[in-house]
Image: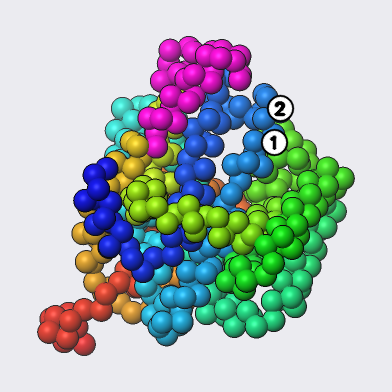
Amino acid sequence: MTSGVVAEIAAATAGRDRVLDAVKAAALAAVVVGHSLAWHIGPTGAPVNVLDLATGLTPLTWLFQVLPLFFAAGAVSNAASLARSTSSQFTTRRTRRLGTPVVVYSAFWTVLLTIATAVVVLAGGQDGPIVDAGRFLSQLLWFAGVYTLVVAATPLTARWRSRPFLALTLWAGCVAAVDAARAAGAPEALGWLNFLLVWGWLGQLGYQLPTLRQVNKAVVGSVGLLLVAAAASVAYLGPYSMSLVTVSGDDELSNLAPPSMVLLLYGGGQVLLLAALWPLLDKLLSSDRLWALVAVFGARAMGVYLWHIPLVGIAALVAMSLDWQVAPLSAPWWLVHLAVVVVVLPTAWYIAGLAGRAERLAGHTRRFFRMPPTVAALGMAITVLVISTAGFATLYGGGLFGLPTSALINFVLLVLFWQAVGPVRSRTDPLESSR
């Protein structure tokens, strides 16, 4: 990257908080790297999660689980954006920005897999593999759905910043109550409340980052380490899995799907450690050259998060077709998986740039009927969560909580909610003036 490009990027991003942007970009990059390493071809020749076979990798799930920092850093950005606009304007703008990459990604796969399903079925084949592929490609959309819920709640939760101890304590108590119910055998659906409660709590703590940065760094850092230690202790002593991602065959409570008190404590520790390390990170990112790399990746970070999914799937399919089976964590295993990381990151970034062109075109789409922004945001978030479980190729089948759903109907609903937060039509537009 030339000095001129670096200077141009620095000038164009002069008003950005470099640490906040770097934290959000690094969190999503860690997810991509983790997924690029997680696949493995098992003894049966089918792709599996390497954690299912190599429990010694469990500590790495703690290293790569940094999404709590994204929600905390995002909360700071959300609060600043809300302060500059009305609640309605904030919700409209943020929901549109979050939804557009998801709409483009969903449109591509819904259309492609629907056509593939039609061809296969008309030829007398079975659509099962296509349905499975659709679910694989959609499963990570849960993040976009949950974050949209957190954004939609920002005008309300931002009001609670003045009483952080009370809000955070009561909120954590709700998480603990849900976990207790899960451990006691409550219906599975109850546990999914923690998707909103845990990630929302981390956002609520994130509101306090500007204040925490003013506290003695040794004190904040020490408390952060204590929270991390508490998370590990609760995971070890309680009814929880020791992994911070869901592992097949683990009978203990998952810490991610749905999230648990373990993730809450661990994420809280991460946020406090971030506050303690803020001056160091700020100094590090004062380098325009380093910041330029962060800014270039961060500009497409959500796209990279979405489009890395099919790339990891392709890597696993190639290995499976070649009958490539080696011992997990062996030298050949690491060599190939690190190569996948090196390929997936820049390729996903490039594809995200191509998708960005479609996103910019879609961004000009004006809304054709009104809907309260909060209703549109909630509707879009719930629809995205349904898509994440139902997939892009389920013409009719089970979705969220096992309820019947359809990929085509889900996509139509997604577009309807998304357009409701689009630009308002001009008064000279015939559709608008004819009302």
Q: Is residue 376 above or below residue 50?
A: below
- Report the predominant secondary structure element of the magenta stretch: helix
Q: Looking at the image, which is closer to me, 287 or 352?
A: 287
Mark 1: which secondary structure?
Answer: helix
What percent of the width, then of the height, locates residue 275? 61, 62
Q: Looking at the image, which is closer to me, 110 or 178?
A: 178
148 sits left or right of 231 in the view: left
Residue 159 among those drawn in magenta: no
Mark 2: which secondary structure?
Answer: helix
Q: Quadrant of the N terminus?
A: top left
Tell me whether the residue at label 1 lies in contact with that at label 2, contact meaning CB atoms closer than 8 angstroms.
yes
User: Range of the magenta residues?
Assistant: 317-345
What percent of the width, then of the height, locates residue 33? 49, 37
Determine the residue positioned at 69% across, 81% down: 163
Q: Residues within 10 Å of mark 1 (few under 14, many from 20)?
A: few
Q: In the rendered structure, which amino acid carries the disc numbered 1? A: Pro
Gap in Å between the C-alphas at discs 1 and 2?
7 Å
Look at mark 2 in the image and give the residue it sits on: 56
239 sits left or right of 265 in the view: right
Q: Quadrant of the C terminus?
A: bottom left
Q: Can residue 178 be seen here?
A: no
Look at mark 1 in the image and give the residue it sits on: 59
